[in-house]
Image: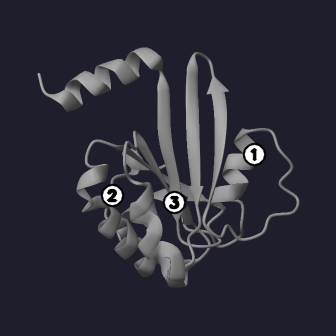
Amino acid sequence: MGLLSIIRKIKRKEKEMRILMVGLDNSGKTTIVLHINGEDTSVISPTLGFNIKTINYQRYTLNIWDIGGQKTIRSYWRNYFEQTDGLVWVVDSSDVRRLDDCRQELENLLKEERLSGASLLVFANKQDILGALKPADIAKVIGHSTEDMC
């Protein structure tokens, strides 16, 4: 049994998880995290760097790292990859013109060795906006099955 397997077994017992919330700028990452945590979402400004929210759900402790998505800071995303259990990739379903950028950035993330054991959830956000693409259409563009989409 390798060291990584032992660490994963210990983590399961602790039931503490590190979740990265990433995506292009203005996709709604911070709004999602605040909403889940029951906080006010009426005034949100762009995330420059990161925010960490700890959410207790049932017997789990979720440490959610909300990482800024501006193009100038995407190269710093790799600084947050260590010990990540889950990756939530947030897509702005109404921003059709940047879907190719979205696909390319996700592909780059999935090549990262330090994220190889992390689960992936693609979150098709802003479904309430008129003209937003459906999750199945987004899945076609970014190359993932709708089973990965939320």
- Residue visible at 57% across and 38% down in the picture: 63
SS for tag 2? loop
Q: In which quarter of the image is residue 1?
A: top left
Rounded to the nearest angstrom, the CA distance separating label 2 from label 1 is 26 Å
Query: Crowding near pointer 2: few (<14 within 10 Å), some, many (20+)?
Result: some
Residue on which disc 1 sits: 35
Residue type for callout 3: Val
- Residue 6: x, y in percent? 24, 22
Q: Between residue 55 and residue 78, name the one nearer to us.
A: 78
- Residue 134: x, y in percent? 53, 61
Q: Between residue 46 and residue 132, name the one nearer to us.
A: 46
Looking at the rendered image, the disc whose residue lies closer to the viewer, 3 or 1, is 3
Nearer-N-terminus badge (3/2) = 3
Residue type for callout 1: His
Nearer-N-terminus badge (3/1) = 3
Looking at the rendered image, the disc whose residue lies closer to the viewer, 3 or 2, is 3
How many badges with numbers are in the image? 3
Residue on which disc 3 sits: 22
- Residue visible at 39% across and 72% down in the picture: 105
Rounded to the nearest angstrom, the CA distance separating label 3 from label 2 is 16 Å
- Residue 131: x, y in percent? 65, 73
Residue on which disc 2 sits: 144
Above or below 9: residue 141:
below
Say whether residue 29 is visible. yes
SS for tag 3? strand
Residue type for callout 2: His
Nearer-N-terminus badge (2/1) = 1
